[in-house]
Image: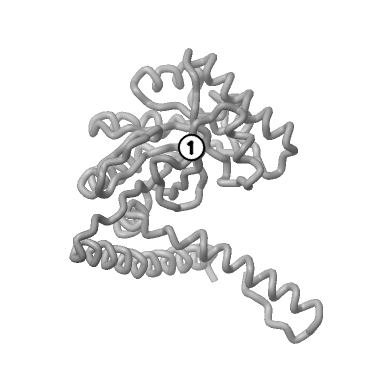
Amino acid sequence: MDSESPRLSTRLLKVLIACGFYALSESWRELLKLLGRTPPSAATVIYYHHVSHDQRERLVRQLDHLLRWTRPLPADFTEPPSGSYSIVTADDGWKSFADNAIPELERRNIPVAVFAISDRLGASVDGIEFDRLVTPDELRALNLRGVCIGSHTASHAVMTSLSEPEASRELRDSRAQLAAILGHDVTMFCFPYGAYSGPLIPLCREAGYARVFTCDPESAVAPDFVVGRVRVDPTDWPLEFHLKLMGAYRWLPAAIALKRRLRAVLRGGSRTSSRAPQLPA
């Protein structure tokens, strides 16, 4: 089987489930309106990584779609309006995003937050050779253009693999380094790879952050300290992007948690019975 086939099948399955979830969610909202009640408001936070020159037109279509369906807000929002709204963020601080996405966001007055890796500015991470991170001067220029800059740790560390002192150092060093570059405080943080755990949240508060972002596709509410996000790419299908934008992937964390529990149960059963079923990888 072609190596792309499993990924395509999984992607299609997610879209189908999201379609059902979206239909149920919208039906519930309409029912509330019929009952004279106002549906609750919440934001969907999306995040990008790279946006190549060849993908710029696809991005334009996504941003125009975003403006038709939602009201964009900055990542440091505190009082959300009623209705559907969205927040655009980008991880790592890639040069391709700065060159191709930022100008299109500016043209549409869409706020954006970029989470930068303070120790790797001007270099790259994860062995990526086709792109690089912005330099300190380029990051400062983005900030002067109105881009909100947040921290993505100092070294792009997997935070769940660090000791408490190491994690605290990543949080504090990155915040201090970015503040020195930008000339003002940095109050937002995003976990690299979406890897986080409960004990890390108090460390973020102690390091001085006002809001932290994960990669869990959950709706955001104004008072929340921990805010979920859903990944989008210029290569997303139009329907796929719409579903992500409208919060129709909120079911995914629960599904992943259920899958992990099932695997744990089956592994436990295999210790006592050689005929215990095995969950497919």
> In which image quadrant can residue 87 be found?
top left
Give the image location of residue 99, x and y in percent.
37, 29
Near-viewer residue (71 or 47): 71
Q: What SS does tag 1 mark?
A: strand
Give the residue type at disc 1. Asp
Q: In this figure, which residue is indicated by the disc labeled 1?
A: 91
Would residue 43 be found to the left or right of residue 209 on screen?
left
Indicate whether 171 appears above or below 44. Answer: above
- Examine the rendering and report whether any part of residue 120 can be seen: no
Seen at 35% across and 34% down, the residue is: 74
Would residue 21 be found to the left or right of residue 196 on screen?
left
Give the image location of residue 103, x and y in percent.
30, 29
> In which image quadrant can residue 249 be found?
bottom left
Seen at 22% across and 64% down, the residue is: 30
- Examine the rendering and report whether any part of residue 220 can be seen: yes
Quadrant for the N terminus in the image: bottom right
Would residue 237 be found to the left or right of residue 125 on screen?
left
Quadrant for the C terminus in the image: bottom right
Give the image location of residue 177, x and y in percent.
58, 19
Seen at 40% across and 18% down, the residue is: 141
